[in-house]
Image (tube, helix red, strand yellow):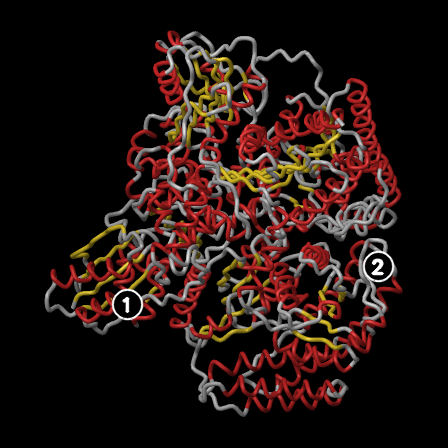
Amino acid sequence: MIDNSGRIEFTREMKSKYKILFPNMADFHFRILQKVLQSYGYDIELLTNTDMKVINEGLKHVHNDTCYPALLTIGQLLSALKSGKYDVDRTAVVMSQTGGGCRASNYIHLLRKALKNAGMGQVPVISVNLAGLEKNSGFKISIPILRRCLAALAYGDLLMLLNNQTKPYELNKGESLENTMRWIDFISEKMSQRKAFSQREIKSYFSQIVDSYAAIKVNRVPKVKVGIVGEIYVKYSALANNNLEEFLAEQGCEVMVPGLLGFMYYCLINNIEDINIYGGSKIKRSALKILLGYLGRFETFIIDAVKKVPYFTPPASVGHLKSLVEPVIGIGCKMGEGWLLTAEIMELIEHGYSNVICAQPFGCLPNHIVGKGMIRKIRALCPEANIVPIDYDPGATKVNQENRIKLMLAVAGEKLRDNPAY
Amino acid sequence: MIRIGLDVGSTTLKCVVLNEADEVIYSKYERHFSQIAEKTASMLEGILLEFPGEEASLCVSGSAGMGFAEQIGLDFMQEVYATRIAVKKLEPETDVVIELGGEDAKILFVTGAMEVRMNGTCAGGTGAFVDQMSTLLDITPGEMNELSKEHSKIYSIASRCGVFAKSDIQPLLNQGAQKSDISASIFVAVVNQTIAGLAQGRRICGNVLYLGGPLTYLSELRLFFDRALDLSGKCPENSLYFVAIGAALCGGASAVDLAETVEKVRNYSFSGSFKSLSPLFRSEDEYSDFRLRHKSGEPVKTYPLRDGERAYLGIDAGSTTVKLVLLNENDELVWWRYQPNSGNPVPIVRDFLLEVYEKFPNAIIAASAATGYGEEIIKNAFHIDMGVVETIAHFSAAKKFDPKVDFIIDIGGQDIKCFKIRNGAIDNIFLNEACSSGCGSFLQTFAGALGYSIEDFAQMGIFADKPVDLGSRCTVFMNSSVKQAQKDGASIENISAGLSISVVKNALYKVIRVANTESLGKHVVVQGGTFLNDAVLRAFELEIGENVTRPAISGLMGAFGAALYAKNNAPAESSIISAERLGSFRHEVKAINCKGCQNNCCLTLNTFDDGSRFIGGNRCEKPLDIKNSSEKYNLFDYKRELLCSYAPFKGKRETIGIPMGLNMFELYPFWHTFFKALGFGVKTSPESTRRLYYKGQHSIPSDTVCYPAKIIHGHIEALLEDGVDAIFYPCMSYNLDEGISDNHYNCPVVAYYPEVIGANVEALGRTKYIYDYLGLHRRRDFPKKIRAVLEREFGKIPLAEVKKAADLAFEEYYRFLSRIRAKGKEFLAVARSKKIPVIVLCGRPYHLDPEINHGIDKLVCDCGAVLITEDSVSDEVGQFPTTVLNQWTYHARLYAAAKYVADSGDPDLNLVQLVSFGCGVDAITTDEVRKILESKGKIYTQIKIDEITNLGAVKIRLRSLFAAIEQQKREKIDR
């Protein structure tokens, strides 16, 4: 089916016949997410190709001035479609669309253009959005699916958090990651059976997960603590950030990456704040608040579970993030990562991760404001902040990026020597 | 025990040896020409000889030292950190360190909150930049320093990166500006770049220390820094060695075995793990076949000119080379010359012409044409009959070699020109945007930096086994990619091949942005000096998967085409300078400031011995004193006048300051009326100028944001100086909904720049700064929301008053828009009745600012066109399906205007899109606007603008556009 703008809809009939490909971003989370969607009858596959072809396809088919994440996600999809592994006439692709004022809302259109240019215009492109932008009769995110997806993200967040806080200190190399992978397999399996997302199960598994990490033998020597914030894709995707987490681990740091749930809540909150700031339907606002309350429990579960073990640092609630950021930037700043990015920096500093890398695609518009634009103000409020913005794009070289990060680490190391408790 | 500090920089190698009292007892400095391992080993060996048997510690620093220090297991210290250690030890009084290195610029704030700033990925290197510029000027950096002492004026040169600066400098050279003035201007550009790019909101004051090569060797550069910062900095003893000293001080307590280390370094085989591509040629045979096919290395064939035969002369004064050809009646090449222009084409062309008259004393030069950057000056100096825009010249030439040519690509010294030919007409023109220019000359500069000629350097890549993958970005990025490759141990051969491939990829994917290489066509003609290098040509063929035609006179095509053009448009008698006159030809250059308007352009006044004058550097026709009788229809002018008519006023309440930038260019009539109705006074910031920009540049936190945003900082500073009671600059996620788009956002920068101002302009603490989130899109809610804001700041205001003021304001806003529309339509009607071409100059409201558009509107009108704007026609088209998410109000107007132009069927109505560098949103809109236009066979023209003040390239574009339109029209009549 083709609508008036020439878009190919993903129809109900296609659901049973088509394979759906989706580009990777946060590996832990997306592996579990994939199982949720499979359990709803979608033949969906998470892409794991990360070779040079991905970048080359991106460069070839996407306007080179668009942001790096568009280049990579589209490159990954095209390169997979061209690999011969899939029947192009029986494959659809998925792309998320926020509908915000950032150009990221247009990735999906860039993808369509790219597919057309590459002679694969018949491939349906499914928009995953919560803004009611494009609809597909064969692909619907109902509230129950949404809730399960959020549960998957919550598992991902928790595993990422604990893995990051345990790995640098483990006595037996590789034990933490092994534990993480074991849990991902276990939860994935449960998710395929449409389990592990009731409140009771979540609480129980969260507690077991925390216990399993607490059982790993560690030697907690003082290490430089580094937080990573940034444009959502570059922040999580090792492909985009040149294996940033791995590099930091090699440099002997403990890394904290704020979770994905926060972003989901942030999107919901923005709809509420829009009405607060500019006016609008009070009924809609109440409905949104109820939804936020309903979905918001996941983070409470995470915080409660992690809190049990004193040497683990739990994430802050989105409500706390909001209150942290209000002295710095308006909550109305909602394009891209918006106020959330600034809030995450504040939260990291509050938790002792005062060395922060702000990872962004070269020329990222929102980051001019919420990243680079706010550093001065954050420093005025938190003098210990040691923030370095790093640009990523196909032309940026690792040597420059690492050099800048090393500088930040040298300063951090000096502070750590002066004050090991810090 | 001695302590050795080793600083492996991007271009140089430095080492020091400290004794137990931390005194420098040995130091050495040399360029490493990227042979890092060997040079390091021999440097260490030198120390070993000097201090035999001494125990020594060793610590490495520097960007190029990171990899190998880690591999060999030596101590490594990040270089800025090392600098700080050294400064604390040697110059403890220091507050701020400014260090310029080969490719890095750093500012280190030592006192107060310690901060270090390094240049970002976009703000190219400074030492390398000065080198690059000195190569361009054909003098040494030292000579630049000496020359700049005699400067009499400063030209404004874009300070972002070398490529930009280059495209500012080249035309200055071509117009005959003095090297002394240019040298000084380059230093000023470096100063501005450092301060704008790195200080980011922190003032540089107190005791300033200058470190690094450029600041050590270039006394004038230090002086310009002093002047800009209004202080006098210090360049200490050992200013080159601070990084090395810091490293030595950081060195571990334990000694290393120096002899063993030397061996390790020498035997250190670099990992070879750089990303590589397939070789250009797999075998000697493959290469010789290729050479045969392209007749590589064969001399250009020339034909005789009979006595008394009419001859045609073409001159191409390009950015880096000057070319001249002479044709006979059969369009055959009789004689040619090709020479680097060394900055000024006039004396070269004079010599060429002297040679022509000497060699062919009996020839009759029947017609002559000039083309290229120096077209105007050459035309004036030698009374050449006509000028022809480069694109047309190249097309004329290419047709001679392949009548079916459907794609021409010319990679010259500084620019890439490509055009698609459809139905025998130039259909689409791609010129490189300012950010990726200089590809050919980049190869040259790089070759020079490594100590080779460009020919030898390119040739080295022919049989490279693993060409380095350097990506397809602008040259500054390539610079650091090369650095990375060197670090990874890539050989010169592989780097050379990699650079050739990059030049090609840049042209294909950055400039033409081909989505698939087949779309280029089957009959591709390549030309320009850069393609004379077999490596580049081969890389191009491999990339597009098609054999192409490289004419034997590939480097001369512009001149050849000009001569053909001259022949086809020959006057009754040529006016070209005679042999006698040429003998006494003299030429003088003087720099002057135009007083024509507030732009105060720097002009170069060229006087020739016959008293004729030529003015260069002008942005408009004004200084040329051309009496242009025809009236100008410029809607930009009208809009500016209209905005000016909303004069500042005093009220019974406080005075509100409004910064005239970004969306205020559209919303000012609204706020003006609104505040007036409420009894406030209103004052606007002054008109944008370069000086205003400098005033605010110290607080710009992100140097890659667009110029229209950056200049806001200056407007805010100006308002603060004016002493207004409050500055009003609201955040606005949403714009007004004009009913032609899916959503009505502002772009993130327009929406939230007030936040950036609030967070970074320190002086705002002195006044009220109102930057609340406001939404005009919800007219009913607006009065209540703004009332809350105003009452918070100024006390009670009755809601009824606010409502009334809002109503008046909305009314005024819509009246403002409808006036623009009415005027636009009036202009259109005039154009149609007088049969004048019309250009819809599309952009954003703030492109109205002459400091932002650099007078492109005037240039369009000078070309004889009527100029209207996107917002004057966007209401004529309802919402229509687009292939992108149409969600920004200003950008929806672009699509609508494009649709209007496309659907008009009027060959005289065309569109030119202005795009600010760094505008992420326009990466989306440009493709869509192009698509809408091309779907109806219209030509799409895009002009990228930044701090660049050179209109040369813009002029080429516009002239090509008009030439193409003319041709299209002619062909329509023919059919």
For the residues labelled 2 and 1, the Cα–Cα distance comes to: 61 Å
Task: Count neighbours of disc 2 (C-alpha within 10 A) and say few if under 14, some if 14 to 19, many if 20 or more.
Answer: few
B81 to the left or right of B506: left
A272 sits to left or right of A183: right
Label 1 secondary element: loop
Image quadrant occupied by the C terminus of chain B: top right
Q: Picture coordinates of residue B773 (x, y %)?
A: 73, 51
Counting from the top left corner in percent of width and height, residue B481 is at 43, 55
Q: Nearer the viewer, residue B502 or A244?
A: B502
Q: Secondary structure at mark 2?
A: loop
- Report if residue A161 is visible in the image: yes
**Amino acid under label 2?**
Ile
Instruction: Give the residue pinned by disc 1.
Output: B268
Going 45% across and 33% down the picture, which residue do you hit? B553
Q: Quadrant of the N terminus of chain B?
A: bottom left
Examine the rendering and report whether any part of residue B166 can be seen: no
Query: What's under tag 1, amino acid-wise?
Result: Tyr
Of B924 and B364, the residue lying toward us: B364
Between marks 2 and 1 in the image, the one whose residue lies nearer the viewer:
2
Pick the residue in front: A57 or B398.
Answer: B398
- Position of residue B918 relative to residue B312, above or below, is below
Residue drawn at 10 percent across, 69 percent down:
B53
Q: Chain of mark 2?
A: A
The percent coordinates of residue B48 (x first, y second) are 14, 64
Along the viewing direction, whichever of A197 and A118 lies nearer the viewer = A118
* Residue on which disc 2 sits: A2
Residue A257 % position (x, y) = 57, 72
How many residues crowd mark 1 within 10 Å: few (<14), some (14–19), many (20+)?
A: some
* Picture layout, residue A181 above or below residue B120: below
Provide the chain ID for the residue under circle 1.
B
Q: Is residue A175 above or below residue A402?
A: below
Quarter of image, res A343: bottom right
